[in-house]
Image (tube, rainbow, N blue to C red):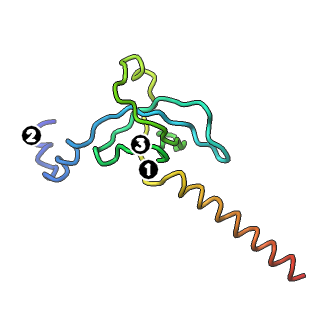
């Protein structure tokens, strides 16, 4: 970047950018009603505070969800060629499942109310 471009960023933003580093993680694809068995290798930009990836949700550029399994410490260069680029979302798998289960619970309660009302 040129000096003029760097001057547009504040010092706080520059500090945040310098803390982010690319990490290689193992992920599983998360479908509508299940999580895939096979693990894929992904490349994610994380800070040091975000290195816990187990149970976290990640998105790719198409909006598909992946669940983090483990962080790979020393990746090989051949592994990086096949890595999927992902972005970290703030949601966890347990919170996503809780939302889905709450929808089902509300539907069952509604059906039970209407059943006993008749």
Q: Nearer the viewer, mark 3 or mark 2?
A: 3
Residue depicted at 65% across the width and 60% down the height: 101
**Sequence-first disc among 1 and 2:** 2
Q: Secondary structure at mark 1?
A: strand
Q: Report which residue position mark 2 lands on.
A: 3
Residue depicted at 59% across the width and 61% down the height: 99
Nearer-the-camera pick, 60 or 88: 88
Q: Are marks 3 and 2 in contact (CB under 8 Å)?
A: no
Q: Secondary structure at mark 2?
A: helix
Percent of width and height locating residue 46: 33, 42
Percent of width and height locating residue 33: 67, 47
Q: Report which residue position mark 1 lands on.
A: 89
Q: Secondary structure at mark 3?
A: strand
Percent of width and height locating residue 73: 35, 29
The residues tagged by marks 1 and 3 sit, at their Cα atoms, a distance apart of 6 Å
Q: Are marks 1 and 3 in contact (CB under 8 Å)?
A: yes
Nearer-the-camera pick, 63 or 101: 101
Nearer-the-camera pick, 38 or 64: 38
Q: Quadrant of residue 47?
A: top left
Instruction: Count how many numbered circles sit on residues in the image.
Output: 3
Nearer-the-camera pick, 9 or 39: 39
């Amino acid at each position: 970047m040129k000096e003029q471009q760097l001057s547009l960023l504040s010092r706080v933003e520059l500090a945040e950018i310098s803390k982010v580093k690319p990490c290689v993680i193992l992920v599983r694809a998360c479908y509508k009603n299940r999580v895939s068995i096979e693990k894929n290798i992904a490349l994610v930009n994380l800070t040091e505070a975000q290195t816990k990836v187990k149970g976290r949700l990640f998105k790719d550029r198409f909006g598909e969800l992946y669940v983090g399994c483990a962080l790979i410490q020393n990746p090989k260069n051949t592994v990086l060629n096949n890595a999927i680029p992902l972005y970290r979302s703030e949601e966890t798998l347990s919170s996503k499942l809780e939302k889905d289960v709450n929808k089902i619970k509300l539907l069952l309660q509604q059906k039970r109310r209407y059943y006993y009302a008749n």
